Image (tube, helix red, strand yellow):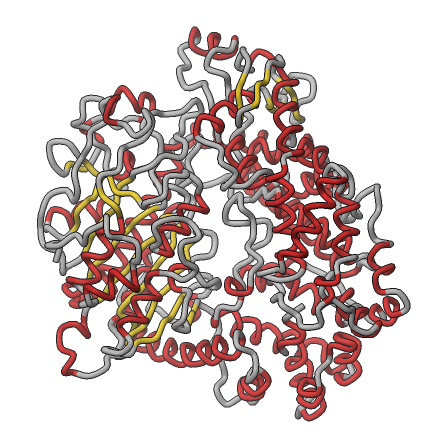
Amino acid sequence: MSLPSKDMMAAIAVTRFGLGARPGEIEAATADPKGFLTAQIRREGADLPQDGGETSAQRFEAMRDFQQQRKTEREQKDGEAATKTQTFKDTQRALRDKIDADFLARARLAAGTNAAFCERWALFWANHFTVSSTKQITSVLIGPFEREAIRPYVFGSFENLLVASSTHPAMLTYLDQAQSIGPNSRASGAAARRGNGKAGLNENLAREILELHTVGVDAGYRQADVTEFARALTGFSIGRDPEDRAGQYVFRENAHEPGARTIMGRHYGQQGLKQGLAVLSDLAAHPDTARHICGKIARHFVSDTPPSSLTERLEQRWMETGGDLAKVAKALIDSPEAWAPTPAKLKTPYEYTLSTWRLIGAEPSAIERLAPILTGLGQKPFSAPSPKGWPDDAQTWAAPDALIKRMQWAQGFAAAIADRSDPNALAVQALGARLTPAVAKAVSRAETRREAFALLVMSPEFQRR
Amino acid sequence: MNAPLNRRALLGLGAGLGIGVTFLGGQAFAASEGDLAKKKLVVVICRGGMDGLSVSPPVGDRDYAGLRGSIAFKPEEVLKLNGVFGLHPQLSTVHALAMKGQARIAPAIASPDRARSHFEAQDVLETGAAGVYGADTGWLNRTLEVLAPIRPVEGLSVGTTAPLILRGKVQAASWSPGKGVDESARLPTLLQDLYKTDPLLGPAFASGLETEAMAQQAITAMAATSTMNMGAADGQKRRGDETARKLGSTLGGFMIQPGGPQIAAISLDGFDTHAGQPGQIATRLSYLDAVLDGLHTGLGAEWKNTVVMAVTEFGRTARVNGTGGTDHGTASTGLILGGALKPGGIVGDWPGLAQNALFENRDTAPTLDMRALFKGVLTEHMGVDRALLETKVFPDSKTAKPLIGLV
């Protein structure tokens, strides 16, 4: 398979692998389009958003305090409909502001970065290991989760990333692992003596690690494997005030289910924490994990139906390198299939809106400018509908109503900024060699700058990548 | 406060509830189509694995209380249906309809999928296939496809993303609350021109524009007739209920418009109750009840021509788990409602909760394939040809014979 021209490759590097062109970005990539991307692969991981830098432990404690406060208020007022006090409302507002600030900082990074492939790669993994604000305690931990458990690991070994995700308080709360207790553990015995019969196993995290994070649903595991894995993971929990490591990951030896486990035909005779880690290690190295995730990488970056030659090459590289994600990223860049000139992917709402900011060399200045359109297009900030994360196929996002909403937003955006721009130059800057005569003509013939701008960002070429 | 519905009042509907509405429209085509042209079908998809034993607690089953432990309902806590079953206390609309013979439960219904994976099971529910990856189009879309030669229909989804159940050969329109489109503007026309050669964006955008025009008519008509009491909204749940009720009545309002949709699908999220189940599911069932209440109100006299089916991808474990919740299971409860329904008892058999009756010693055992329910309603209520039902809409479903006699 031959590669397209350097000019076309530069446009593809910036739009398909990245987040859309910032001013001058396509030119910067033209001399060496592949090298432009490869230079963004960095062992130290992806950039961190410039936010307040609060740790998940601080956030966890703040949310626990709030929940305690709410409980007290309810008891005092005798009913949930009681008027909330000002302090309560202030705390609630402050927590919401933190979540908004996390999301805005991440969006500003995406809009402003010169390493947009690196950012896309990080966003892919954040979505692979989805945690969502659909659970209140998790909502304040999503920003810290991406900072602490995802971004540092995205160009390292997959196993390290898997362990970082599976032991982070955000994941432990989102998938109910923190309270899961081995039925025959000491903690369970103690709970029973206290008359707290509720304490026991929860299989949510175990199931989703198998199904979504590693081997995938068709890997042939059974219900018994899920339950055994859930037993192996008992003890993965979060420290509580006044313990050491309050709000941080802890392994609770006394909650761990004693005994050896058998999972997907393998025997695990280890004790305690080592048992769960051994299972995670085997799952990370499993060929089905390579197949499952490499298929997903190809579908995310290249096409909803990628050529098998591409997925096989990624898979082979994954297996050769023991899941070295830097090497897999490099293999993606080196795959000729990824440079096919026809854009096969439709931008998700997040990619689409951020690429519009990048086009004009700006960053969203307030959450109010960003959140409503993402919510309107079906991608509410930090609120993936399920542990599977956001879909990224065209069928999902190209619903008729979504296109109408994209158009209305494009008109509003154009009204705010277009009078300061030269639409014809913007079209070249946005798409480079991907600019088609039809779009160039439509832009040049527009009645107003606003109309020209809206046509450009609504064009199939801009919405696809 | 009496507030008429208008576009502004509908802004933001569904946000935060995880609610999306999808409907497929039929042009009220020719009067000669007679009764069939009036029939309406709504599918409510409860996503996340809705716990059937909470929807219709079998408080009269002798094994129920023991299995459910701390989260079991006492017989006096449920809305009684018969000697075995009650309804969750939040399902008061459903109960009132059941008392009139306009709501029934199918307490052990399941899709043919047994993997206990949300994503696989939702795929199977929406594609109507015998197994995962068995089809890549939705069965409601294929219903439109086979009806097209008889009563040309077009699809419409309300909600920002296109659900699998209506994806397929028939271009599904979609709509969700938002500001309208200025039809005199040049931009839509210019864009249609740019999309001429784009097989995805072209048809989708054209459909979006048509729907916007229709939605504006429907909402104007509703604003003129609606006297819905918005009430004072205290607390998130009550606000959620009001939003859900409004969404249901809006959908009903759409369906009674001339040329409005005859087939609709709504999604409700948040039923994955692994921990702390009672509070969580009470909220979600209260939203479900409010949507159904709104729909009932919004459809008005047309309720008599309507069947509503509320189903989920799988039920949950019969036993309470270690964290006050339940894990992924198999059979669950389906709700079947509507003025077109014939009164009757439970739909399908109740296998009971004795240990040897549980599926894999764990879940409510399935006794009814949900495709049998769908097929029965499509053929008897919507007039879908039996042969096409088997070959096009639900291929590989011979084992699931259409459930006849519901309407």
Query: Does residue A204 appear left or right of residue B32 in this picture?
Result: right
Q: Nearer the viewer, residue B123 or B283?
A: B123
Q: Quadrant of residue A322?
A: top right
In the rendered structure, the answer to whether residue A168 lies left or right of residue B276 reads right
Image-based side of A354 in relation to B222, left or right: right
Give x and y (percent) for residue A148.
Answer: 73, 37
B302 relative to A252, above or below: below
**Residue A59 showing in the rendered view:** no
Q: Quadrant of the N terminus of chain B?
A: bottom left
Residue plotted at (52% across, 60% down): A378
Tell me: residue B213, above or below residue B313.
below
Tell me which residue sits at (55%, 55%) in the image.
Answer: A391
Residue A339 in percent (x, y) is at: 74, 66
Horizontal side of B360 relative to A96 (left or right) equals left
Q: From the viewer's perspective, is residue A204 above or below residue A377?
A: above
Residue A10 seen by the camera: yes
Farthest right residue?
A31
Quadrant of the frame with the C terminus of chain B? bottom left
